[in-house]
Amino acid sequence: MSFKILMIGAGGIGAYYAARLAKAGHSVVLTARGEHLTALQSAGLRVDYEGEKLDCGLPAVDHAALVQNYQPDDFDLVAVALKSTATGPVMKELGDWLRAGSVPVLSLQNGVDNEPLIADVVGQSRVLGGLAVRIGGHIVEPGKVFAEGMAQVVMGAWPQADNQNDTRLPLLDRLESAFNEAGIPTTVTDNIRYELWRKLVINNGVNPLSALTGLDTRSLTHHPEFGKIVYGMMAETVEASKADGVNLGQKDLDEMFDLISNFNAIKTSMLVDKEKGRPLELDSIAGAVLRRCERLGIPAPYTQTVNALLQFQESGDHSVP
């Protein structure tokens, strides 16, 4: 079955998955802006996936052209691959357009707070939670993207299926088959919040510290001191999950630390953003952990310290208040 997919956000993650799906015969429309959009429209999308070239000419539009030229139900799926800092503003910008249709919306983003923002706009029954696993990717220049890793996807009905008659379930089965056939290793879970929190364990462990130190994931996890901090920030994330009733445990902590320790030595997305002077997803990652630890009344000294240092570094205002 061929899908018509709108990919909101053509950065490293969104562009890679879009290219894979397009190569497999699916119809994909990208949204982008600025020089990246201009390059996509004039020269097409060029993806370098660990030396494999995935070049394709896909329709690319900004949000104004999207609203003008398309209806939401022109698509079988809307996938959101934006930075989590953009979720709220884009849902506000496209809210009226999205509400005019019934198309399901899949988040492929960092953090655990994107799906609630999407659900506020389209309703829970149209929301699919998702995450990109073991993938690194970024725009190297307008129209060109580099990606690496196994690039898996996990998706599921958010926050869970209403019942066995939930219309999202057969769609998820079809998407799982289509993504796998396109070369994207994909699984469907009946507990997507659990999977989202497991990824946040990794993201909080390495993203803020990598942006603070400039080190890649392998350098951090194998460093005699920074490795302890990574593990500590991961442990605090495990505790924070209990505020959402997810209740991760020691097994999850050790599995996630082992996974990132043995993964490719990659620059985290937060480090890339810092180097390029872009806003950091700090509030969506460390902030999400700190808010929940505060709610639970438990300390999170590793996350709090790294978060404070990075905020201080980013603010440029080094005066004492």
Image (tube, grey):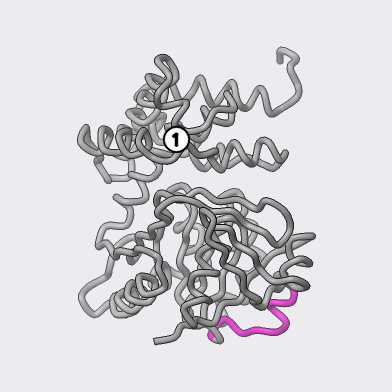
Instruction: Measuring from the top left, give residue 177's x and y in whole percent.
Output: 32, 75
Give the residue displayed 40% in from the left and 15% down from the top: 224
- Quarter holding residue 316: top right
Residue 259, x across and y down, in percent: 32, 39
Q: Is residue 307 above or below residue 173?
A: above
Is any atom of residue 134 visible in this view? yes
Image check: 69 left or right of 184? right
Q: Is residue 142 left or right of residue 229?
A: right
What residue appears at the point 42 percent right and 56 percent down from the top-left corner? Answer: 151
Q: In terms of image quadrants, where is residue 29?
A: bottom right
- Label 1 neighbour load within 10 Å: few <14, some 14-19, many 20+: many
Please state, as top left, top right, bottom left or bottom right, where the C terminus lies in the image: top right
- Closest to the observer: 57 or 309? 57
Q: Is residue 70 magenta?
A: yes
Residue extent of the magenta highlight: 64-73
The residue under the point 27% across, 62% down is: 189
Residue at the image position 44 percent from the left and 50 percent from the top:
149
- Is 274 rendered above or below residue 228? below
> Identity of the amino acid at label 1?
Asn
Q: Work out whether residue 314 or residue 293 is closer to the camera in this orientation and state it.
A: 314
**Residue 9 occupies which quadrant of the picture?**
bottom right
Q: Is residue 142 left or right of residue 286?
A: right
**Circle 1: element type:** helix
Residue extending farthest top: 320
Q: Which residue is mark 1?
A: 204
Q: Is residue 253 magenta?
A: no
Main SS of the magenta segment? helix
> In this view of the protein, which residue sits in the foreground, 317 or 8?
8
